[in-house]
Amino acid sequence: MTKQNPKPIDVALNEIKVLKSVIVELRKEILSLNKKLEPLTLDLRDRKEKELEEEKSYEKLNSTSWW
């Protein structure tokens, strides 16, 4: 008895199923990474805001100085 080759459509459907499972796994991993990075992102945003405020205060000092 010889083994029959699978039909191209069956091969394609199997590959689609595999790709879907990989996408689902990657989505879960990305979501978990986003949750872990959220505190760091918020901290970075706060630091940048403080830095911008400090820069603005320096600009005010330079504009009001007498030299």
Image: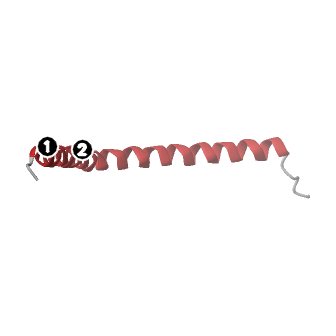
Q: Picture coordinates of residue 41 (x, y %)?
A: 28, 47
Q: Picture coordinates of residue 11 (x, y %)?
A: 77, 47
Q: Picture coordinates of residue 62 (x, y %)?
A: 14, 49
Report the disc number at residue 3.
none
The residue labelled by disc 2 is 42
**Count of numbered labels shown in the rendering:** 2
| Viewer-closest of 3 and 16 | 16
**In the rendered view, does 37 fall on the left or right side of 18?**
left
**In the rendered view, does 10 fall on the left or right side of 59?**
right
In the current view of this chain or complex, which residue is farthest to the left? 66
Give the position of the N terminus as an image quadrant: bottom right
What is the three-letter code of the residue carrying label 1? Lys
The residue labelled by disc 1 is 60
Q: For the residues marked 1 and 2, what is the alpha-carbon distance in whole angstroms? A: 27 Å
Q: Picture coordinates of residue 16 (x, y %)?
A: 68, 43
What is the three-letter code of the residue carrying label 2? Leu
- Describe the element under mark 2 as helix, strand or loop: helix
Identify the residue at horizontal 63%, vertical 48% (top origin): 18
Q: Which comes before the other along the chain, label 1 or label 2?
A: 2
Mark 1 Cα shell of 10 Å, populated few (<14), some (14-19), many (≥20): few
| Viewer-closest of 54 and 41 | 54
Identify the residue at horizontal 60%, vertical 42% (top origin): 20
